Image: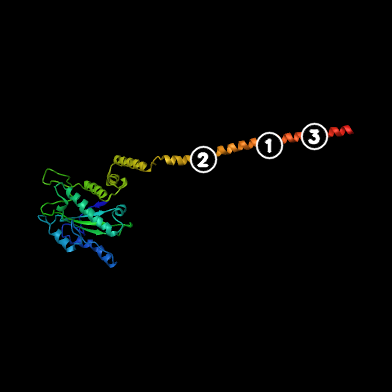
Amino acid sequence: MNIDFPPPSNGIYNNANSSRQLANYLEHEDLERMQKGIYTEGFFNLKENNLYKSQVIKDIDGNIGQLLKTDAKFYAIHVSPSENELQTMGSTEQEQAEAMKRYIRKIFIPEYARNFNKGLSGADIKFYGKIHFGRSRSDNKLNMHCHLIISRKDQSNKIKISPLTNHRNTKKGVIKGGFDRTTLFENAEKGFDKLFGYDRQLTETFEYCNTMKNGNMDAKLQMQDVELKTQEQSVEPAIDDSVDKSINQPQAQSKSHSNKQSGMSSLFSVFRLANDSSQGQEEEQNLLKLKKKKNRAGFRM
């Protein structure tokens, strides 16, 4: 699961002004799909689906109480499952889209609210989501992902919240609370696995990817050791008596067959010796008879 916060810019992610530019951009895929006769997904929030862009713009732009002209009015977030995760979420685009909305509502937004450490819940977050099904720069077959527009202020329009702050659960000073993006990524990942029963491999975890990208050499080596042990455990075959028996059975059969052949050979040898002995005795008797005949003939001469 890839979750990222596009940095504010002078383009579509310019969050110091109206959200209209970003909302317009998020509808660009709809026109392409409508021309092909493929269904589209409208904007959604915590409870409603198929909301109009005009409602999104009005609601986000109107929730800016006490914010300065140059302050951020909203934030954009991308939530992009991997191909394996998408296969777990459903076999069709519609199934995957419904699963994504369920994940955003039940897991991501509540975790996002909790991460500010201000006692907020998912119901306190003003947001709108838009699902896209393709990526122009991707070779993957499955590319469904979700764009979120989240207001800088909570639903009451009183509390300022920013996922880009550098504060982490601050309890003293002017700014209290904060936001820990690492904690959000980890909890959002665990929530996904629990919601969809996803068997996440070590190399798919945020901890592994973050360590191999940003960790020091010791941390990377330790993670590689864990990876090797995990691979060894998955490859190690289970001991099965039936397999051993099946393996030894041909050897036993071969040995038994060899013994039988040896026994038969011995038996044939006995028969042959006996036969040779009887033939020798018969030949000896015939020679004696011939000698007697010769002697008798000699006496006559």
Residue at horizontal 83 percent and vertical 34 percent from the top? 293
**Res 122 visible:** yes
Distance (Cα) linking label 3 and label 2: 54 Å
According to the picture, the residue beneath numbered tag 1 turns out to be 275
Viewer-closest of 111 and 134? 111
According to the picture, the residue beneath numbered tag 2 turns out to be 253
Residue at horizontal 16 percent and vertical 62 percent from the top? 55
Asked if the residue under mark 1 is in contact with the one under mark 3, i.e. CB atoms within 8 Å, the reply is: no
Count of labels shown?
3
**Res 134 visible:** no
Q: Give the mark nearer the N terminus: 3 vs 2.
A: 2
Label 2 element class: helix
Amino acid residing under circle 3:
Lys
Label 3 element class: helix
Asked which quadrant contains residue 6, the reply is bottom left
Q: Residues within 10 Å of mark 1 (few under 14, many from 20)?
A: few
